[in-house]
Amino acid sequence: MSSDPAIAVRQVSKCYPIYEKPHHRLLQGLFRQRRTFYREFWALRDVSFEVAGGETVGIVGRNGSGKSTLLQIIAGTLAPTQGNACVTGSIAALLELGSGFNPDFTGRENVYLNASLLGLKRDDIDNRFDDIAAFAGIGDFLDQPLRVYSSGMAVRLAFSVAINVRPSVLIVDEALAVGDEAFQRKCYARIHDFRDHGGTILFVSHSGTAVVELCDRALVLDSGEKIFEGEPKKAIAHYQKLIYAPADRAPRIRAEIQGIQFLQESAPGPESTLPTDRTLGEDKNNEDVSEFFDPNLLPKSTVEYARCGAAIQNPQILTPEGRQVNVLVTGRDYVYVYEIHFTEPAIGVRCGAMFKTMGGFELGGLITHGPGAGVDYIPAGSVYQARFPFRCLLLPGVYFLNSGVVGSQNSEEVFLHRIHDLLMFRVAAKPVPDRAGVIDLSSSKSPTLSISGTPSLTAHDTSSEG
């Protein structure tokens, strides 16, 4: 990683004039500065940061926080109102679907158009065209007009051009979210390869897992201001606190985050004690992370399916002692519980629960009975309780639970009731420096590294050190 900044953003602000009526724009042109017919909207305010050569920096923030505006200024497609942004070396930006593409041109023609805009000469494009086409994988559509492409096909081609022009700096906005899973995995693999070979990346994503896995640092933007810059895990924790905060608490949480940033920037040295995610709002004398119930941790993406004689109600996560929680700790035992109210008789009843990531990836599920089994008969008016004991093996982050009840009708198993994203919970930010990803796969034994046939050297064995 180079110490010289590949990207330098210095006190960048962007203001847009907002006109209430169309003719006000004309009047403003006539009156110039003698009279104002608009109100100011500051999309960015005094944002400064640097990205070193070979570094990967993530940017997270709520919708409307100024992320895309900032990327456009860095990419040079938008001029700032104040400040400046400098980029050293060639740059390729994947900001939005179809940017730099002509919908009436074929995919092949758009490859040459877009690559030339990114600074490649005709001979260079000819040499790389086969790689671009192979990575995009859109087959015969390469010679069809772009207007007949799906959004996924368009982003395949756009990303393929951007990554194969081999820029010094790659800027990626959330555009990869529209690709299918296989293509997303291929894109992330190529981004990893680009980073490992010294490329500089500015990465915007709503996926906390992707930011933590990919980035060296992360910024949190809110209302056009940079409110935090630091370790990706801390940035994501602050970001998640902000987006799930109720409206009346958001300003206080934002102020807390800015206070942490100020303390970090003004700390006299490594011996200073800074507040962490664990100590914010909790007992600072408590040396361990504790589970608790946050009443504001409510899902906004719940989807309920039609009821067929049963209704799922009162979902809860309980500690072994019966205390309700929704902020969990890795490595501890819990019980997921919900009630089923039967309004009609049911036979062959069994229940399930599915754990999912923020992005909807299914991590694993639990069922009360296997296929072909279940409670033989439940009369109408009954209330049953489904209980799913589990050990939390998830690393810090936000997760969701699906729930479903099935029964037999006309010799076929059908859902009596099903709810997606019924319950949301968070795993507390407990430091786990030797683990990564989503699942805690650690054991009571330490990982080892040894030459075959010799004693293992564990992570805690220092006896061989001189």
Image (cartoon, rainbow, N blue to C red):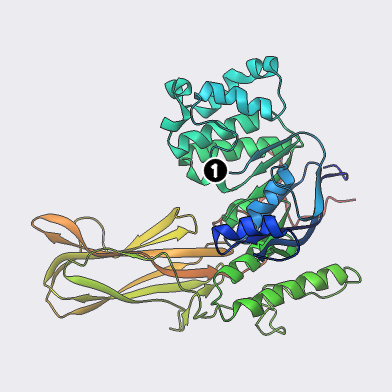
- In this view, the residue in front, 444 or 149, is 149
Depicted 90 relative to depicted 319: above or below: above
Depicted 92 relative to depicted 58: above or below: above
- The kind of secondary structure element at disc 1 is helix
Q: Quadrant of residue 286?
A: bottom right
Q: Position of residue 167 (x, y in %)?
A: 72, 32
Which residue is situated farthest in the left direction here?
A: 410
Depicted 107 relative to depicted 99: above or below: above
> Residue at image x 58%, y 18%?
130
Q: Report whether 365 appears left or right of 4.
A: left
Q: Position of residue 242 (x, y in %)?
A: 60, 70
> Residue at image x 65%, y 55%?
67
Q: Position of residue 451 (x, y in %)?
A: 71, 38
Q: Position of residue 119 (x, y in %)?
A: 72, 27
Which residue is situated farthest in the front direction here?
A: 30
> Residue at image x 47%, y 34%?
153
Q: Report whether 338 appears left or right of 318.
A: left
Tell me the residue that label 1 is attached to.
Answer: 176
Tag 1: amino acid: Leu
